[in-house]
Image (cartoon, rainbow, N blue to C red):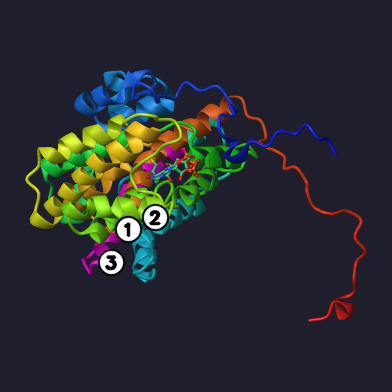
Amino acid sequence: MSEDIVIHKGLENIYVKETRISYIDGVEGRVYYRGYDVEELVEKSLYEEVSYLLIYGELPTKRRLYNWIADITSNYALEDGIIEILKKLPRNASPLDILKYSLLTIGLWDEKINSLDRDDLYEKIVKILGKTPSILANWYRIRRGLPPIQPDRNLGYADNFIYLIKGRPSSQDAEIFDDVLILHAEHGLNASAFAGMVTISTLSDLYSALTSSINTLKGPLHGGAAGAALKMFREIGDPDKVEAYFESKLSRKERIMGFGHRVYKTYDPRARILKNIISRLELPPNVDKLFRIALRVEEVGMERLCRKKRICPNIDLYSGIIYLYLGLPDDFSPAIFALSRLSGWLAHILEYLEDPRLIRPRAKYMGAIGLRYVPLEERGD
Ligand code: COA
């Protein structure tokens, strides 16, 4: 066996492809989608436009955006069959699993499920983007014992989601939700984007690739971090107890949620944008309390983790608080993250399909060889 094999644990700093989708400047603390600063996109754009930008590589013309939105909204409505299935699912199923299940369900109804032809992919993409928010929002309703309602195709993406969960439109909530969607829409070749790419590299189907991404997003080190941060704020209970919490966690070498990132070695710009949005809101007391704890966690973490070790606040320090403000239960946070990230994942999948190559890394074998097979009856208990 060769001795000069280098093991790249976690594939850290291994480049596997070229990309034009997004760039994270981990030193300056900026993120660009297709060259556009995400801060400007949040300020001036809508999620629908950003999803087009990510997936098709350029800002749409007026006509293209109109068609894109029309194609997505024409897919908003849910077939009775889907609603009936949702009603039968166990109420404690996580929204992220429901999102995954809904993708698989949409796939089952797709007669061209395996086609990777560009026009067929377009049909699938607008269907996925149109139906998934309707399914997720109706899951929110069903779980609360509310009757499912049909989406309103005259409403924009964020507006429609807020309408479905609240039963009425709210322009302020929709605006905030739109910002949240844009901020989470893409973030480089992270674990979930990579997982989708691995699946599509076998020329599997689009739905399978996206569900691979969702499965990978689930963990607390990735999409589960926002919920874990909220749990941490509740555990701390009071801004005055933050220092003691850090002391006890760090002495046991445990992680502080909402801090650290593979690429950013400075403050995640998305966290700053979210913090500014929250600061402008009139928060109900329960949310305000958690926000004050989060601000103190940031202060202490800046000193103990960011300045000293370049482990700095990331988006998940504040995203859970926004979800809570919007009335979404904790376990919705990875699902909302995934809902917005569908655009980024789709962009990575399409980009990979331009020049696909089966992804097949290797592992250095360290086990034994040539062992004698011992019959079961001779192996003892
Ligand atoms: N709190 C305390 N210590 C942390 C930390 C955190 N949030 N994140 C990393 N570290 C420490 C590790 O314990 C490790 O210390 P060691 O070298 O003494 O063992 C060191 O920093 C490097 O950790 P590693 O996991 O290799 O860094 P990474 O860059 O691969 O990790 C994350 C990136 C996101 C997985 C990691 O920072 C983390 O777990 N953060 C908390 C979860 C989170 O907020 N995720 C959302 C990401 S957007």
Choose between 56 and 21: the one closer to the eye. Answer: 21
**Marks 2,1: beta carbons within 8 A:** yes
Give the image location of residue 302, x and y in percent. Answer: 28, 36
Q: Which residue is mark 3?
A: 143
**Marks 3,2: beta carbons within 8 A:** no
Q: Is residue 26 visible?
A: yes
Q: Secondary structure at mark 3?
A: helix
Q: Residues within 10 Å of mark 1 (few under 14, many from 20)?
A: some
Disc 3 to disc 1, how far (Cα)? Answer: 12 Å
Q: Does the magenta portion include 135?
A: yes
Tag shown at residue 331: 1
Q: How many numbered marks have been drawn onto this rendered protein structure?
A: 3
- Whether ligand 1 has any atom under 8 Å from the Cβ at mark 1 is answered as no
Q: Quadrant of residue 95?
A: bottom left
Q: In the displayed image of the protein, which residue is found farthest to the left?
A: 282
Residue at screen point 50% across, 35% down = 120
Give the image location of residue 314, x and y in percent. Answer: 33, 38
Give the image location of residue 156, x and y in percent. Answer: 22, 38
Say what amino acid the circle numbered 1 marks: Asp
* Residue depth check, mark 3 versus mark 1: number of the one nearer the observer: 1
Give the main secondary structure, helix, strand or loop, of the magenta stretch.
helix
Answer with left or right where residue 231 lies relative to residue 14.
left
What span is in magenta?
123-147
Disc 3 to disc 2, how far (Cα)? Answer: 14 Å
Disc 2 to disc 1, how far (Cα)? Answer: 8 Å
Q: Which residue is mark 2?
A: 96
Choose between 121 and 377: the one closer to the eye. Answer: 377
**Sequence-first disc among 2 and 1:** 2
Say what amino acid the circle numbered 3 marks: Arg
Give the image location of residue 180, x and y in percent. Answer: 26, 39
Q: Quadrant of residue 339?
A: top left
